[in-house]
Amino acid sequence: MSIQSREDRISRKKRMRKLRANRICQVAAVLFGLVLAVVVISNFLKKDVTFSESENRILTERPEWDLQEVMSGDFMTQTESYVADQFIFRDSWIWLKLQLDKLAGKKESNGVYLGKEGYLMEVLDEPKEEYLKKNLAAVRDFSSRHQNLNRFMTLVPNAAYILKDKMPANAPVRDQSKDIQRIKDEVGESLNFIDVTKTLQDHASDPIYYKTDHHWTSLGAKYVFDEIADDLEIVPVQDYQVYTVSDSFSGTLASTSGYHGQRDTIEVYDPQGVENDYVVYYADDQERTTTIYDRSCLEEKDQYTVFFGGNHTRVDIETTNKEERCLLVFKDSYANSFMQFLTPYFRKIILVDPRYYYEDVEQLIASEGVTDVLFLYNLNTFLTDTSLGDVLAVQESE
């Protein structure tokens, strides 16, 4: 066999391998294009989801085209959020990303840290300075208009800060004590700011936060209630009947990260030796009940909504208490599990969630005879809140 013929065969084999490789690449490109087309068309055709039960939040809606927002870049930002929230099979992609993150040895997945002892911790946000300044100014203005009312503010530090020893090694933790001190410095002269950081730190070894959810537990809420009761001029009962209503709770952080290795227990506290009858009115649903608990929610994914069935625009709790005090609470979802401790001590409690409330607060205060006001948020939400300032602003008459 000649050297020339052997080289020809080698050359032909190389050409054939190259040809096969090119065909494989072409087929792969076509398949990728088809898959991409199917995904794009499916995303376009599928009905948008308005609320994520797994993350307990409203998902971004399709943005409306507006020239001014296009020019400012806001339209593209909203579009990116919309695509991320509405992407088809979103929960499956989150689970897949978690598995890849775990294989790579990562300790954070989708904004959730995989902490020690099974704790999942949400990444603490940087303040939205524009809104924070606006909200703090609104709180000061509100307080100056209502010096006749008892005014209180409590911001609850988050688990990632209070339980930072449970965070992964070398994970960054925002110093929320500095945030609280800043807010206290800016509004502390206009109302009674109650710092509960040390109270929670003193009980950090107790289950004061859920392992799988971003909320505090009923026990954590009780410790804070006991701490602020004196400021609220309340003498709290010492005896509670504690009921475990679920031992299978897997919260929003488990759903967001895709990590479902833990289960939490949900407890409710029933105060003993004190009258605690009341009627709850939900303004958005126009429904009345005789309990702040919705047991049907224990059959749903987000069992934390057992408290009030979740967040509402406005909730009124009318009690049989002979006191004349009426408490108005500006709140986020942390307050939902806190109310079980407040119901025996006020004639009426009105819960307003500024994220959904568009009515006139001044008219509400006057018509209901409000005597006390409490701002109760978890700190991470308060630092990024975009709604409180607008709700507290005086509405101009038409």
Image (tube, rainbow, N blue to C red):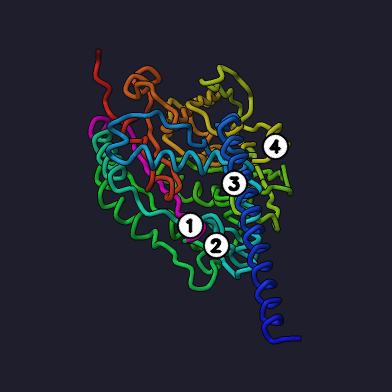
Point out the frontmost of discs 1 and 3: 3
Real-space CA distance between mark 4 and mark 3, rounded to the nearest whole angstrom: 38 Å
In this view, 159 is above or below 15: above
Real-space CA distance between mark 2 and mark 3, rounded to the nearest whole angstrom: 31 Å
Q: Earlier in the sequence, mark 4 or mark 3?
A: 3
Expressed as whole percent of the image width and height from the top left, the position of residue 238 reads: 59, 47
Q: Are marks 1 and 2 in contact (CB under 8 Å)?
A: yes
Q: Who's the residue at 34% across and 37% down the image?
A: 151
Real-space CA distance between mark 1 and mark 4, rounded to the nearest whole angstrom: 25 Å
Q: Residue 85, which numbered label?
A: none
Q: Which residue is mark 2?
A: 108
Q: Are marks 1 and 3 in contact (CB under 8 Å)?
A: no
Q: Which residue is mark 3?
A: 33
Point out the stretch of residues depicted in magenta. Answer: 144-160
In this view, 94 is above or below 61: below
Mark 2: which amino acid? Glu
Check the picture and name the quadrant holding the C terminus: top left
Q: Earlier in the sequence, mark 2 or mark 3?
A: 3
Q: Which residue is mark 4?
A: 300
Pick whichever, 318 or 41, lies toward us. 41
Q: Residue 123, which numbered label?
A: 1
In this view, 206 is above or below 268: below
Q: Earlier in the sequence, mark 1 or mark 2?
A: 2
Q: Are marks 2 and 3 in contact (CB under 8 Å)?
A: no
Real-space CA distance between mark 1 and mark 2, rounded to the nearest whole angstrom: 9 Å
Residue 210 in view of the camera:
no
